[in-house]
Amino acid sequence: MKLYTKGGDDGTTSLFGGERVGKSDPRIRACGDVDETNAAIGVALARCRDDGLVDALRQIQSDLFVLGAQLSRSGSGESGVKINDTHISRLEGLIDTACTETPDLKSFVLPGGCETAADLHLVRTVCRRAERAVAAATNLLDDGVTALLSWGCAGAVAPGLMPGSLVVPESVVGADGRRISVDRGWHERLCRKLSG
């Protein structure tokens, strides 16, 4: 099987079902950003040593494949795989578990820290871009898709998203000019747990 078809040389690509759309179509952009989110999770998985987090991330990757299939489908028919309440409930369960296993966050945390935390901070930012791309294509989608990216993918890996840089200032300046304290120990404790 060849990895190229030359079918897109004219600047178009096919959706599932055969419909041709431009490669700059909002749905195609969303598919690419969801795919990049999945790839970023793969990088995080390559270094993650926390079995529970590995299981959660693999499930999220599977859900992102469902999302990609839904985004790629021609028309608005009900056939095919689709993000549904079961996906959302499972993600909510992962978020709830993550929140009970981590200390309360009382201040901003800077991205970085151990490898897993840094990887997941990158996943968070790529996921947020995918969320914006999906929002730009909302006339083609339903609420389940938006929910998966909005608070699902990023939130479900909360234990890894929160740890920050090991060199953290005592405070940062907020948008309103006020100083906001930064928890200098919370992220280090969590990084030790993730790396252990």
Image: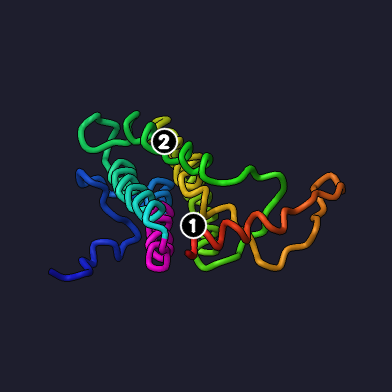
User: Left or right: where does residue 52 sit relative to residue 98?
Assistant: left
User: What is the three-letter code of the residue carrying label 2?
Assistant: Gly
Question: At 30% across and 41% down in the image, what residue appears?
Answer: 70
Q: Which of disc 2 and disc 1 is earlier in sequence?
A: 2
Q: Quadrant of the N terminus?
A: bottom left
Tell whether position 140 is magenta: no
- Depth order, front residue of 146/43: 43
Q: Which residues are magenta?
A: 32-49
Q: Secondary structure at mark 2?
A: helix
Which residue in the protein does label 2 denote? Answer: 93
Which residue in the protein does label 1 denote? Answer: 123
User: Left or right: where does residue 99 sit relative to residue 80?
Assistant: right
Label 1, residues with CA under 10 Å away: few <14, some 14-19, many ≥20: many
Q: Is residue 28 visible?
A: no
Tell whether position 41 is magenta: yes
User: What is the three-letter code of the residue carrying label 1?
Assistant: Val
Q: Main secondary structure of the magenta part?
A: helix
